Amino acid sequence: MVLGGAGGTCTKSSVGLGAVGSKLTVTKTTTCTIAGAIHAGDATAVAAFKAFSTAYTALKAETCPSANNLTGQALECVLFQ
């Protein structure tokens, strides 16, 4: 599922999207394939956005252990094939 806040616009997709939702609007162009339902401002979209917002707020409140702090460190660039 793709979830947008104020709105979502699908302009080009080489892979068909599943369900798409937004609290307000979903705009689909002719170059975009949406295989699932479109939820624009309906109860499903509002509930999904509320669940996302609750989860984001909880995650944002978490602290990062100092051992995981990468500020100022140079990281090796690795290419996965």
Image (cartoon, helix red, strand yellow):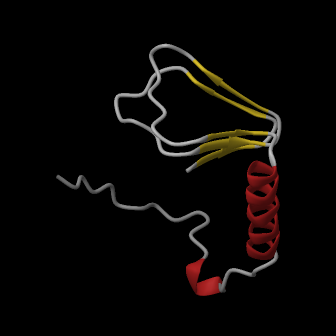
Splitting the image into 4 quarters, where does residue 10 fall?
A: top right
Which residue, as the protein is rendered here, is positioned at the far left?
Answer: 81
Foreground residue among 67 and 40: 40
Question: What count of labels does the image hold?
Answer: 0
Counting from the top left corner in percent of width and height, residue 65 is at 66, 86
Counting from the top left corner in percent of width and height, residue 24 is at 82, 35
Which residue, as the protein is rendered here, is positioned at the far top?
Answer: 30
Splitting the image into 4 quarters, where does residue 15 fall?
A: top left
Residue at the spot x=22%, y=55% of the render?
A: 80
Foreground residue among 59 and 79: 59
Residue at the spot x=81%, y=52% of the render?
A: 43
Residue at the spot x=45%, y=38% of the render?
A: 35
Q: Is residue 68 above or below residue 79?
A: below
Counting from the top left corner in percent of width and height, residue 60 is at 78, 70
- In the image, taking residue 50 as reference, residue 16 lies left or right, namely left
Counting from the top left corner in percent of width and height, residue 50 is at 82, 60
Q: Is residue 72 above or below residue 79?
A: below
Q: Is residue 68 above or below residue 40?
A: below
